[in-house]
Amino acid sequence: MRRIPTVLRKERPARTPDGDVSLLDDGAWGFHAVDGLPDLEAAAPYVDGQRDRHRLSRTAHGIEPRGFDDELRAGLARIDQWVQELEARRADGRGTGDLYELSPYEVEVCAALTARRDAAQRLQQILADDVAGYCGGVATVHAGLVMEYLVPAIGGTARRNVSDRVTEFESARHRFRLALVAVALDNGMSAVQIGAAFEFSRQLASRYLKEARAKWPELGNQTSGRARTS
């Protein structure tokens, strides 16, 4: 790649007689400097030790990245505990003995949750492949072959693969949220309560309610929650 000449290049410190460039100048900067700024063109070539800092971070090398925060994990754990206790009571005959009857909207929640899991697994594999390619990507740049990423079979295909999986996952998340909104309406929750539950803005909550009522017209006349059995 052709370098663009600059005025500062003419002020670069002269090379030593043996042709090597010292990493330190005679001042207090700790690097070759022009008017107090580092002269990157006069820097010594990368060596293996210097390249280490460009390699994969410790997190991407296998240390588990942080997922859900502790508060959310605790909340989900409480729900799981309630489910286990309820199932245990029913198994021991301490419950009503009647299975909970799912509403059509709760059936849709299950289907949407399954679709979201499948989409998440496909996205997870794409992201794993992306992370796995980090070291090779950096090595490609240092080898001067970065333009190879602009070949459509590489750059275009990679972009489409990631974009398609992200879009699929976002669509599945939307479907799951919409099903939950339908359940909320079926159980008598107001628009304000639904917005607060999801931490939605008022406008976004209104759009979800409108979409849910368009998909399930019977929810438009819903005024009270249906009876639940335990």
Image (cartoon, grey):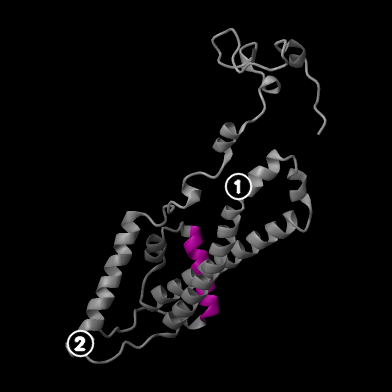
Residue 58 or residue 207, whichever sits in front = 58
For image coordinates 43% across by 72% down, the residue present is: 180
Query: Dot 2 corresponds to which residue?
Result: 95
Magenta residues (range) = 203-216
Q: Is residue 31 left or right of residue 185?
A: right
Up-down relation of residue 140 to residue 14 (above or below): below
Marks 1 and 2, how far apart at CA: 57 Å
Of the residues shown, which amino acid type is indicated by label 2?
A: Gly
Of the residues shown, which amino acid type is indicated by label 1?
A: Cys
Magenta stretch encompasses residue 35 = no
Residue 179 or residue 55, whichever sits in front = 55
Mark 1 residue crowding within 10 angstroms, few (<14) / some (14–19) / many (20+): few
Magenta stretch encompasses residue 208 = yes
**Residue 62 location in percent, x, y?**
46, 53
Query: Dot 1 corresponds to which residue?
Result: 135
For image coordinates 45% across by 77% down, the residue present is: 109
Please tell me whether mark 1 sits on a helix, a strand or a loop: helix
For image coordinates 67% across by 27% down, the residue present is: 45
Please tell me whether mark 2 sits on a helix, a strand or a loop: loop
Which part of the image, by quadrant, shows the N terminus? top right
Q: Most prominent secondary structure in the magenta stretch? A: helix
In the displayed orientation, state which residue is furthest to the front. Answer: 18
**Residue 100 location in percent, x, y?**
32, 87
